[in-house]
Image (tube, rainbow, N blue to C red):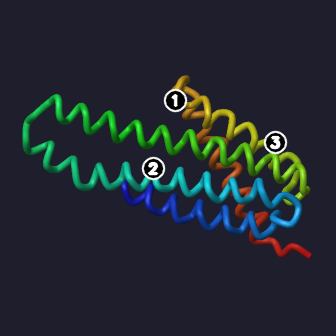
Amino acid sequence: MNLESILLSIALILIALALRERMQAGVPNLMRMVVIGVSIACVLWLASALIDITGSPSIASAQDVSARRAVIAIYFGLIFAGDHALGWVLLLIGGAALKTRGLPQILSYLLILSGILGILEFAVQPLMFVGLILGIIWGVWLGVELLRSKA
């Protein structure tokens, strides 16, 4: 999970910067908030990866169950907090895309739906699986849209 978190963080920052380039003229303040929000999400995911990399081996060898539970709780708390922040980012991107017509309308609504699911994910954990499927769909679609040249 650690390498995936690091690679996902890098990819999401690059995606946010590409979207800012595309839509900044129409909604500059929203796009600034998107970049700040994705940075927050990525920092939370990177912190969870670092805790897992550095904390898990020492806790596993210590045989202390309460310390292990605490590290696991912090680890998952940071992951859910990063997912929550990403939910707000997706909501902002979807709204900005609708306002500027920078992305197809259906993709914009899909981003908004994924954002809402990401925001609610920590409270209703089965939404995580629906969000994962939607994330694959909008991720591929958004990648195709960003690779197309904007004339």
Residue 93: x, y in percent? 75, 51
Residue denoted by label 1: 122
**Residues at marks 1 and 3, CA–CA distance in whole angstroms:** 21 Å
Q: Amino acid at mark 2?
A: Leu
Image quadrant for the C terminus?
bottom right
**Residues at marks 3 and 2, CA–CA distance in whole angstroms:** 26 Å
Residue 57: x, y in percent? 16, 50
> Which residue in the rendered view is the most extreme toward the front?
29
Say which label, 3 or 2, has the lower sequence index: 2
Which of the 4 image quadrants contains residue 6?
bottom left
Residue denoted by label 3: 109
User: Element type at marker 1?
Assistant: loop
Would you place residue 129 above or below residue 55 in this image? Answer: above
Q: Nearer the viewer, mark 2 or mark 1?
A: 2
Which of the 4 image quadrants contains residue 148?
bottom right
Residue 46: x, y in percent? 41, 56
Q: Do residues under tags 1 and 3 come within 8 Å of each other at their CB atoms?
A: no
Say which label, 1 or 3, has the lower sequence index: 3
Q: Amino acid at mark 3?
A: Tyr
User: Depth check: 91 or 27 in front?
Assistant: 27
